[in-house]
Image: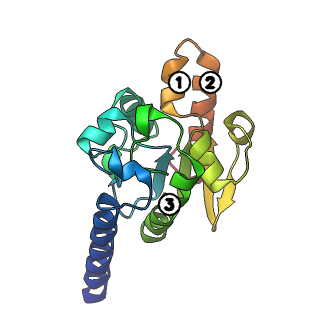
Amino acid sequence: MAGGSSSFLALRNSFSDLEEKIKNCQRCALYQSRHQAVPGEGNRQAELMFVGEAPGREEDLQGRPFVGKAGELLTKIIKAMTFTRDEVYITNVVKCRPPNNRTPQKKEIMACYPYLQEQIELIKPKVIVALGKVAANFFVPGETGIMKLRGRFYDFQGIPVMPTFHPAFLIRNERDRTRKRMVWEDMQQVMKLLDRQ
């Protein structure tokens, strides 16, 4: 038991150190316009991890990932998968909001790369869900669009990754039931892999 509690303490300290590094980061120009960096939140020993693109306006103000409309939809998806937000870990590839919510630039993604890499190493999730093209291309390098990538697992350092549409995309295309169905099909594959069906 003593060994278990000391490893938990080490994990907590490592995570706290990492979050402090992210909050004080100046590795790219995004720090100049941010209100807050957004490290991520959730279960630090989660079997399921969601990775989005970058914080939006609400996330930048609150310092929490996925708290706007896209966050509400993601929470519904998580519940439909028989999880709660507290049971999963949610973060983004880029930890600071790009101006006007533009797509993160390659240099910004590369500046944040070590942070996400370290989060994955600390959490050791069984499955990662990549939300949208930016996140999908982090795990499956290249310029392939999300439509071609989604629907099947890819390997990232021994962890299965399921790319799917970003909740913000679903909101922008609210009438498109086909895309919603595709996301649910993707999540069912994730649930099956985690034995949650």
- x then y, percent, for residue 125: 49, 62
The foreground one among 36 and 86 is: 36
Give percent across and percent down for residue 167: 49, 31
Front: mark 1 or 3 = 3
Q: Residue at x 42, y 70 (%)?
A: 122
Q: Is residue 82 left or right of residue 187?
A: left
Q: Which residue is mark 2?
A: 179
Task: Give the SS element for disc 2.
Answer: helix
Residue 155 spot, x, y in % from top left? 68, 60
Task: Indicate which disc residue 170 carries.
Answer: 1
At 55% from the left and 17% from the top, the residue drawn is 173
53 left or right of 60? right
Kind of residue at disc 2: Arg
Residue 168 is at least partly visible in this image:
yes
Quick one: SS at disc 1?
A: helix
Q: Which mark is residue 111?
A: 3
Q: CA distance from mark 2 to mark 3?
A: 32 Å
Tag 3 secondary structure: helix
